[in-house]
Amino acid sequence: MASSDDPSRREGRYDRRELIRRAGVAGVSIGVAGSGFGQAFYGPLRFKGRWLKGDLTIIQWAHFVPAYDKWFTDVWSKNWGQKNDVQVKVDLILNTLLPARAAAEAAAGSGHDLFFNLSPQAQFEDQVINHVEIVQEVQRKVGKIGGLGKRATYNPKTKKWFAFADNYVPDPVVWRHDYWNGVGIAPSTWENVRKAAPKLKAAGHPIGIGQSAELDSNMALIAFMMCFGAYVQDAKHRVTIKSKHTIEAVKFMADIFQSGETDEIFGWTPASNNNFIYSGKGSMILNAISATRTPEDLGLPFADQLYIYPIPKGPTQRLGLEHVMGSYSIWKFAQNIPAAKQFMADLEINYKDAFLASKFYNFPTFPGALPFKKIQKLAAADPHKPRGKYQVLTTIAQKYTVNPGYPGYTNAAFSEVFGKFLIPKMFAQVSQGKMSAADAVSAADHDFKDIYAKWRKLGKI
């Protein structure tokens, strides 16, 4: 997902008094050394005609496109706070620390007003408010929420919106055109990837698809499965992992690993696949466009050779997950729920600025906030080579991107399977020769069914 999020970049402190002088607000500090955090304080929204007040605390990931963090803290939050008489404090945290921090705040009944995560956290449904008012307010201004956002944050069993998704991230294949051109193949299908894998590895440029306990591996492998017609659950939220399609997918990926990858994929972190491409070694990853933006920003000589494609077509279809789904939750114990609601509504209603600040990384979950036709025009005007390469993102977003848990809704059981990285574990056991494909899939099926039975008993699915 992104090597541009180098923790060392965020270390060190700015002088508080100097920032107060410059900003004219309560203060800013980015990058508390050793903590993975950054903070920003801003103060003064009207919420349906009355003045808001007090403090608003937000925690979210340190974005893999660093320009977005600067915009969110120094521009959006600052201006919003000043207009609405609310002091906004933003804590930026490394994405790998978010799940544990969310669990800690939920357990303690104390924490931030707005909590951001990179995938919907349906397991916290009982600890958060119903976010329906935010959805209704945004729909009143820009039109209906997209199907992807609804299926990721709404529970049809309990009729509750357990989160508010402001954005999702289309997930393309990022590949070195010059390396693939050298073997005379393009990664348009998974069969092409398998054919090219040994040739690319022999040339010193292996493929990189993680099989590790981290977010990118989860997303890539679930998407890969769907291309083979394999799913974690069906539309009625019944476990369907145990199928011939899953077994075929696991065997196929093991073949790609054995012929075209290296053991490093079993220890990948969220930064690994981008580093893999940046090193000049890697020939292909499945990742968001932070992988292309950083080389462009740094003027690296191979930036023009980084192409993006939709996910390769599999034996059944071409279908992928969003790379991440930006989901905000408001805890029931939040201290400033009115301000948190309005902050999120205003952010989404004005999402063009966020889209541009993220350099096309964040797509709004409400299509009317920034229609695809406008995104196409913005992408066509991007100056980087090959010209127009980012236009394919709208095709990926419209035709090939579905919610976590598809063809069902994202739910607490799926979120637990996802959070325990059981899919990468299943693939890795086969690729490393520890289990047969059939046995690994059967073991996963057993684990999944236990998790689903628990949440079904709790009335959440």
Image (cartoon, rainbow, N blue to C red):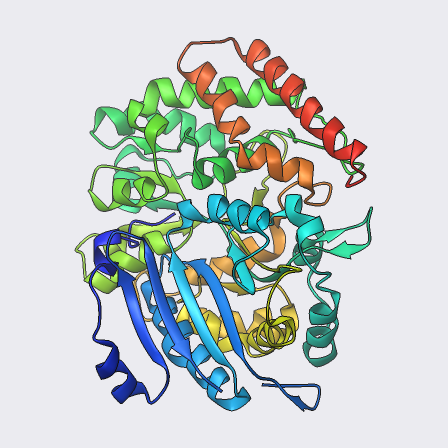
Q: Residue at x 41, y 30 (%)?
A: 212
In depth, the one of 37 and 280 nearer the eye is 37
In depth, the one of 240 and 191 nearer the eye is 240
Left or right, 4 with reference to 368: left
Dividing the picture into quadrants, the one containing residue 382 is bottom left
Q: Position of residue 275 (x, y in %)?
A: 26, 43
Q: On the rendered image, what quadrant is the C terminus found in?
A: top right
Q: Position of residue 77 (x, y in %)?
A: 45, 78
User: Residue 346, relative to residue 283: is it above or below?
Assistant: below
Left or right, 371 with reference to 6: right
In depth, the one of 93 and 263 nearer the eye is 93
In depth, the one of 140 and 120 nearer the eye is 120
Q: Position of residue 76 (x, y in %)?
A: 45, 79
- Residue 233 visible in the shown view: yes
Left or right, 421 with reference to 241: left
Numbered marks: total: 0
Dividing the picture into quadrants, the one containing residue 45 is bottom right
Left or right, 251 with reference to 174: right
Q: Residue at x 55, y 35 (%)?
A: 222
User: Residue 422, relative to residue 156: is it above or below?
Assistant: above
User: Residue 202, relative to residue 325: is it above or below?
Assistant: above
User: Residue 197, relative to residue 419: is it above or below?
Assistant: above
- Residue 381 visible in the shown view: no
Q: Residue at x 72, y 40 (%)?
A: 407
Q: Position of residue 214 (x, y in %)?
A: 43, 37
